[in-house]
């Protein structure tokens, strides 16, 4: 079924005498990739009606200068962006939304306006409306068109997952070894030494999980704060990084939806099959523990790389958790 959408703010404000615009393609359509590639600075696509409810995940591609918004595993918005310029590059990684403010002013750059600010790190990285010259030009933030920033702000909640990629691939990342305590050694031991479960460290907020094929390790975070860790087994090889969101729990069955990453085309939401789920083996005690916190909206990111800071492999971004 063809679903229509709004294409950029310009189409919404065209003078009455102008010819009516051609119908925009669906965000599910096979040709949407060409449309996205041809976007000019300030353009965006917005079709929230295709997924009226469900968890939201945001993916930002630095190479493409595009942001993708998914709700319940379905793309509902795509926008042009401007990320950090040379010397102020936007960090790649997996982040949680820490703070929202409609009328925020920068604490670092002369009270510069940051409308519809959505904070990713406590040291100044955020999504917000701003100037889009068509290339990376910010001090590290992800600038969005004003219209898109306002619409996106209206569908997000604190704690949701934001993935920032350097190119079309999901980024490489790692938490700091001291993220669980002021003692770096203790933090590393708790995260990577065995099965760990301490949900009281963060009592509320959305849950996300990071699974490393290199470490054979699963890290559980709630609102960006690590609350659990366990060894896992993965059958077969993991050659790329992928992301999933839990769309529903029906009769005790968990329905996981794969998220299409920048550069990928999926024919709408694709549910993970039982055979695919069977590739991952998690300790029974961790399955029981996470059952109390995993709800629709939980996000899982699977990476072939290590989660340990300074570990072998490509350079990784340090994850920033909430205060």
Image: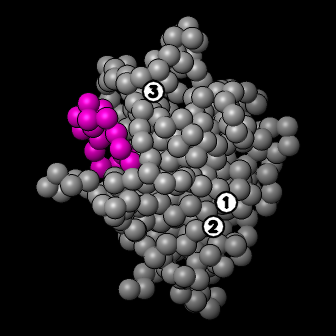
In this figure, which residue is indicated by the disc labeled 2?
A: 263
The N terminus lies in quadrant: bottom left
Q: Which mark is residue 168?
A: 1
Q: CA distance from mark 2 to mark 3?
A: 30 Å
Of 62 and 80, nearer the camera is 62
Res. 19 in view: yes
Secondary structure, mark 2, is loop
Secondary structure, mark 3, is strand
Give the residue displayed 59% in from the left and 55% down from the top. 239
In this figure, which residue is indicated by the disc labeled 3?
A: 225
Label 3: few (<14), some (14–19) or many (≥20) C-alpha neighbours in 10 Å: many
Give the residue displayed 54% in from the left and 82% down from the top. 30
Q: CA distance from mark 2 to mark 1?
A: 6 Å
108 vs 263: above or below = above
For the record, the magenta segment spans: 280-299
Q: Residue furthest front?
A: 236
Res. 113 in view: no
Give the residue displayed 35% in from the left and 55% down from the top. 277
List x then y, in percent, for residue 266.
Answer: 49, 72
List x then y, in percent, for residue 241.
Answer: 57, 52
Label 1: few (<14), some (14–19) or many (≥20) C-alpha neighbours in 10 Å: some
Q: CA distance from mark 1 to mark 3?
A: 27 Å
Does residue 262 appear to the left or right of 258 in the view shown? right
Return the disc, 1 or 3, that comes first in the chain's sequence.
Answer: 1
Return the disc, 2 or 3, that comes first in the chain's sequence.
Answer: 3
């Amino acid at each position: 079924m063809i679903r229509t959408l709004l294409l950029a703010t310009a189409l919404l404000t065209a003078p009455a005498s102008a010819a009516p615009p051609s119908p925009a393609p669906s965000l599910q359509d096979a040709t949407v990739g060409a449309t996205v590639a041809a976007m000019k600075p300030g353009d965006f696509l917005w079709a929230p009606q295709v997924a009226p409810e469900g968890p939201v995940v945001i993916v930002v591609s630095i190479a493409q200068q595009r942001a993708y918004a998914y709700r319940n595993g379905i793309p509902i918005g795509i926008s042009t962006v401007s990320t950090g310029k040379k010397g102020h590059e936007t960090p790649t990684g997996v982040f949680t939304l820490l703070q929202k403010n409609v009328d925020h002013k920068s604490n670092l750059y002369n009270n510069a306006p940051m409308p519809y600010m959505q904070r990713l790190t406590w040291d100044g990285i955020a999504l917000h409306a701003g100037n889009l010259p068509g290339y990376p030009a910010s001090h590290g933030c992800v600038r969005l068109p004003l219209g898109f920033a306002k619409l996106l702000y209206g569908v997000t909640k604190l704690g949701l997952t934001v993935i920032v990629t350097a190119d079309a691939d999901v980024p490489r990342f790692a938490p700091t070894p001291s993220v669980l305590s002021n003692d770096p050694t203790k933090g590393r031991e708790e995260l990577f030494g065995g099965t760990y479960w301490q949900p009281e460290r963060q009592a509320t907020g959305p849950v996300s999980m990071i699974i490393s094929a290199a470490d054979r390790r699963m890290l559980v975070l709630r609102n960006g704060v690590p609350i659990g860790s366990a060894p896992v087994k993965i059958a077969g090889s993991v050659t790329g990084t992928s992301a999933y969101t839990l769309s529903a729990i029906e009769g005790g069955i968990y329905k996981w939806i794969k998220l299409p990453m920048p550069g990928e085309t999926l024919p709408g939401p694709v549910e993970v099959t039982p055979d695919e789920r069977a590739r991952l083996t998690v300790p029974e005690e961790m399955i029981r523990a996470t059952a109390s916190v995993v709800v629709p909206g939980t996000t899982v990111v699977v990476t072939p790389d290590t989660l340990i800071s300074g570990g072998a492999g490509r350079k990784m971004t340090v994850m920033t958790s909430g205060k």
